[in-house]
Image (cartoon, grey):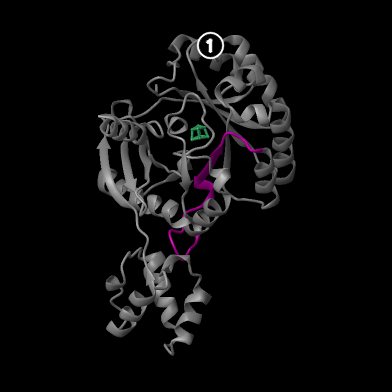
Amino acid sequence: MVEKKDIRDLSLPEIEEFFRSTNEKPFRAKQVYEWIWKKNCRSFSEMTSLSRETRTLLEENFHFSVLQPAGESVSSDGTVKSIFKLPDGALVESVLIPADSRTTACISSQAGCALACRFCATGMLGFTRNLTFTEIFDQVVILNQQSERFHGKPLSNIVYMGMGEPLMNYEAVIRSIEKITSAKALGMSPQRITVSSVGIPKMIRKMADDNVKFHFALSLHAATNEKRDQIIPLNKKHPLQELTEALKYYHEKTGKRFTIEYILFRNFNDSLEDAKSLALFCKSFPVKINLIGYNPVENSGFGQSDPEKVRTFKEFLESRNMIVNTRKSRGKDIDAACGQLALRNSEKRKGKSEK
Ligand code: SF4
């Protein structure tokens, strides 16, 4: 039997071609495309403007690959964490974060992650697979509905900061962003989208060459090789000097400012010396710095920085005329840090199979 293709993998011309080859009117393709991307339908039976025969024809040739909601928890601070089951059983997480006038969706680009950063629950899970662009896109659609349901307004921002390293699944990430920003689909501004990476120099250059319109954020978390090697194993392969060259290239080519994400870990990277190293690292390009409170992950060995140290760290950077924001960790009561729920689930499964 021929395996059915996911209808959403087809471009509009490809759907038109399918209709031509089956002696159907090609203009039907536009209707199908609108049902899929504008009205976000996930079954052929919902396409009520098509005849029963056309719907059956589509059903016989294509399928919809959809995310199955597998859990939702709401934090006392309003953060909503969702877990989704993929068609092959892999689990991914997304988090909806309300703050002031914004609601931000933090979405995953991979099931698990191969990079094994020491502070990260997803890193402890290991890598399962890349998500398809529709699996990434669907998280945004579902979180947009969640945002309406919980907060009475649509999503304002999207960050690719959930499970996985987005630049290691570049093509699917770019295709998902094309759909999120397309007037024929969600129609959001690329200015509201941030792709966050621990820094793969080759891919940072590629983003610059592709002249991407979304924001870029580098998850730096330590500004010396000695410390970064300890928490981000990829740094041994691509040390800070190499990263700096790629970031300079990115800035020169795009003229854009990017964000440095810096999680403050208690007594590891939160001293005045560390702040000086960070300021030195940032001197080659204009950046905005987000200092992030750590959402502790069991067995990571890292804890949250003391408020006094955070204040001193921030004040030092500001004294160097740097733009600095502090971000609190959110949803602690629901394991909202990326990968925490999936890690718990996998530990439970392991526990069961060992019993
Ligand atoms: S921090 Fe990001 S890159 Fe590192 S292990 Fe976690 S998901 Fe992967």
Query: Helix, strand or loop at disc 1?
Result: helix
Q: Which residue occupies the foreground of this view, 336 or 1?
A: 1
- The extreme bottom residue here reads 23
Q: Tell me if residue 196 is in the magenta stretch.
A: yes
Q: Which residue occupies the foreground of this view, 280 or 173?
A: 173
| Residue at 33% across, 29% down | 335
Q: Residue 152: tell me if it is visible.
A: no
| Residue at 32% across, 38% down | 81
| Quadrant of the image occupied by residue 37 | bottom left
- Quadrant, the N terminus: bottom left
Q: Tell me if residue 350 is in the magenta stretch.
A: no
User: Residue 294: horizontal and vertical position, in percent?
Assistant: 44, 22
Q: Residue 315: tell me if it is visible.
A: yes
Q: Is residue 31 above or below residue 186?
A: below
| Residue at 36% across, 28% down | 330
Residue matched to label 1: 312
User: Residue 217: horizontal and vertical position, in percent?
Assistant: 57, 36
In magenta, the rendered stretch is: 182-200
